[in-house]
């Protein structure tokens, strides 16, 4: 039986970024709630990892726009299809927005945006404490939204793979079966 | 449209749903644990700032510690003396602009200048290459405690009693008895007098850091800024004057800039690097790195130092944090305080409004 799957490049990016983004969410949650030595090294990881995700997300978005995803099964209820499409685009939006907000927030706080090894990104916003506070809170709440969207995404993927068994999970886990 | 692979109802549906549930709940629980929401006893930046805030009172828009202060602007002029020990271009020579802030410890922005015998001096050096060095120094020889937990416990133990407005002496005594590391600080503070001027004080990093030279060697140091202006002893403020420090600073700077020598004190082998409650013996090798010159002061309400988080982990290459746990805890706690006060300044929804008439 033939089944349309994501191309190898899309699958590779998906799984690589899933690891990076999950790591990022846990690093972020851990660093803002710890006062021990790990706070410093988590923070040192957070910034370059965020920029890495940003660059990969742009590549992935470009690839996705030029290489459409396999269609969802015809017998899926409309609301589920809508939820699937909306959550995918929400994930793309957050992959790009979160690093930009983090970068902008540090710029507004007049922090050096240290990538490590002496490499510093230039500020993308003027120094402004009010802007810092808005962006810092946006970063927090979008991180929550990001994690909840991830949970829904993972739960739905497992539902496709274990309950519906309709090939949607397989389209991301294995190559074309034909 | 693709063909469904297998549309028969799978066996063991309940078991399959359970796997999905465990995956989702497990991921959420792991996130909740890492984020501290499922570990309420963990010492977090929020808890440290909460106790400082409850000790200092509600003063929206202000720092939760060292709330009363004044901005000072100037520059650092390196003499090249430290270039052999730190690769940072900051120390090679020449001028680097600084934004400083003089302050009193404590969370009350209206505290009398004579209420504490400690003054602090924070600096942000803005290097030409975009790097920054931020440091917060205090005019005292040692930090009272060694760990963030002990700092938190100290602030809980010295929480003002609502009835008297003063800490309960029994609780404070119990804390100090159970924390012998506070001995050096207590011995000093017993005889310490509130200085009449910010300009005549020597301010210490207290925490140790590492300098790294161009060859990759690192050496533990503590730094201090030592004033060129001697204490005259004639500047005793008038009785009842609670804001003499700012007036004194403005008066002095109107005449001439204030100057301090930035001195790096090098640890000998065996000196405690990771414990800010222990002084290093006198006579340690000391290198003069140059002068910090403050030319102009400005009230913090309008000054740019107000919105600076003097996070001691923001360092240029050539200076690195040590294993002293207080350094990272300061960074984490300052970030929480910074978000609170900038949110209040910015009138974010849910944030308290600063009392504009008092600023």
Image (cartoon, coloured by chain):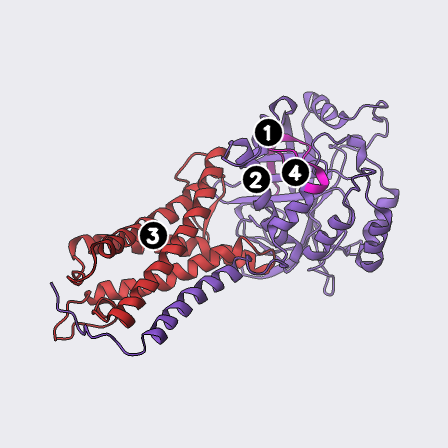
Chain colours: A red, B purple
Callout 3–callout 4 Cβ contact below 8 Å: no
Say which of A26 and B86 sits in front.
A26
Q: Chain of mark 1?
A: B
Q: Quadrant of the N terminus of chain A?
A: bottom left
- Do pointers 3 and 2 mark residues of a single chain? no
Closer to the chain start, of discs 1 and 4, is 4
Q: Return the residue at label 2.
A: B340
Q: Which one is closest to the eye, mark 3 or mark 4?
A: 3
Residue B225 shows up from this direction = no
Q: Return the residue at label 4.
A: B291
Residue B197 within the magenta-colored segment of the rendering: no
Looking at the rendering, the stretch of residues picked out in magenta corresponds to B54-79
Q: Residue at x 83, y 50 (%)?
A: B172
Residue B78 within the magenta-colored segment of the rendering: yes
Whole-angstrom CA distance, mark 1 to mark 3, is 35 Å
Residue found farthest to the right: B191
Query: SS for tag 4?
Result: strand
Q: Which one is closest to the eye, mark 2 or mark 4?
A: 2
Q: Return the residue at label 3.
A: A95
- Do pointers 3 and 4 mark residues of a single chain? no
Count all numbered tags in the image, as a single digit.
4
Locate residue A175, reporting x and y percent.
Answer: 19, 72
Q: Return the residue at label 1.
A: B354
Instruction: Name the side, left or right, on which B130 lies relative to B156.
Output: left
Q: Chain of mark 4?
A: B
Q: Residue at x 14, y 70 (%)?
A: A3
Locate residue B164, reporting x and y percent.
Answer: 83, 38
């Amino acid at each position: 039986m033939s089944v349309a799957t994501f191309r190898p490049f899309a699958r590779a990016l998906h799984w690589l970024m899933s690891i990076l983004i999950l790591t990022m969410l846990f690093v972020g949650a851990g660093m803002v709630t710890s006062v021990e030595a790990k706070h410093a090294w988590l923070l040192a990881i957070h910034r370059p990892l965020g920029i890495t995700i940003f660059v990969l997300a742009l590549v992935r978005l470009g690839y996705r726009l030029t290489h459409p995803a396999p269609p969802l099964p015809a017998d899926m209820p409309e609301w589920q299809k809508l939820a699937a499409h909306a959550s995918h685009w929400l994930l793309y939006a957050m992959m790009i927005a979160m690093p930009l907000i983090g970068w902008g927030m540090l710029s507004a706080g007049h922090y050096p945006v240290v990538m490590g090894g002496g490499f510093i990104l230039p500020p993308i916003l003027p120094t402004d404490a009010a802007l810092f506070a808005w962006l810092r809170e946006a970063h927090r709440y979008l991180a929550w939204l990001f994690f909840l969207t991830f949970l829904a995404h993972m739960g739905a993927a497992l539902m496709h793979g274990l309950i519906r068994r309709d090939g949607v999970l397989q389209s991301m886990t294995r190559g074309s079966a034909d | 449209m693709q063909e469904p692979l297998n549309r028969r109802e799978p066996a063991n549906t309940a078991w399959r749903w359970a796997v999905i549930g465990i995956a989702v709940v497990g991921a959420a629980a792991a996130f909740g644990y890492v984020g501290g929401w499922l570990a309420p006893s963990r010492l977090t930046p929020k808890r440290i700032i909460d106790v400082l805030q409850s000790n200092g009172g509600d003063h929206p828009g202000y720092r939760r510690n060292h709330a009363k202060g004044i901005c000072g602007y100037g520059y650092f002029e390196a003499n090249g003396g430290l270039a052999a020990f730190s690769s940072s271009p900051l120390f090679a020579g020449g001028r680097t602009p600084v934004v400083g802030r003089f302050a009193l410890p404590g969370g009350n922005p209206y505290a009398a200048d004579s209420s504490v015998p400690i003054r602090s001096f924070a600096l942000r050096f803005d290097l030409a290459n975009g790097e920054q060095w931020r440091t917060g120094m205090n005019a005292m020889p040692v930090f009272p405690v060694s760990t963030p937990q002990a700092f938190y416990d100290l602030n809980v133990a010295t929480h003002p009693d609502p009835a008297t407005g003063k800490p309960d002496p029994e609780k404070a005594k119990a804390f100090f008895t159970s924390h012998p590391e506070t001995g050096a600080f207590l011995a000093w503070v017993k005889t310490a007098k509130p200085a009449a001027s910010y300009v005549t004080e020597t301010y210490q990093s207290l925490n140790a850091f590492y300098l790294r030279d161009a060859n990759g060697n690192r050496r533990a140091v503590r730094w201090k800024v030592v004033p060129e202006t001697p204490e005259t002893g004639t500047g005793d403020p008038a009785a009842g004057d609670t804001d003499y420090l700012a007036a004194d600073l403005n008066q002095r700077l109107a005449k001439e800039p204030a100057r301090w020598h930035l001195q790096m004190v090098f640890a000998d082998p065996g000196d405690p690097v990771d414990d800010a409650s222990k002084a290093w013996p006198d006579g340690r090798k000391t290198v003069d790195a140059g002068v910090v010159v403050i030319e102009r002061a400005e009230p913090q309400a309008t000054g740019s130092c107000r919105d600076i988080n003097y996070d001691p982990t923001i360092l240029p290459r050539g200076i690195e944090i040590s294993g002293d746990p207080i350094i990272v805890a300061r960074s984490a706690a300052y970030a929480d305080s910074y978000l609170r006060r900038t949110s209040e300044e910015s009138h974010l929804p849910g944030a308290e409004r600063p009392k504009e008439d008092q600023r």
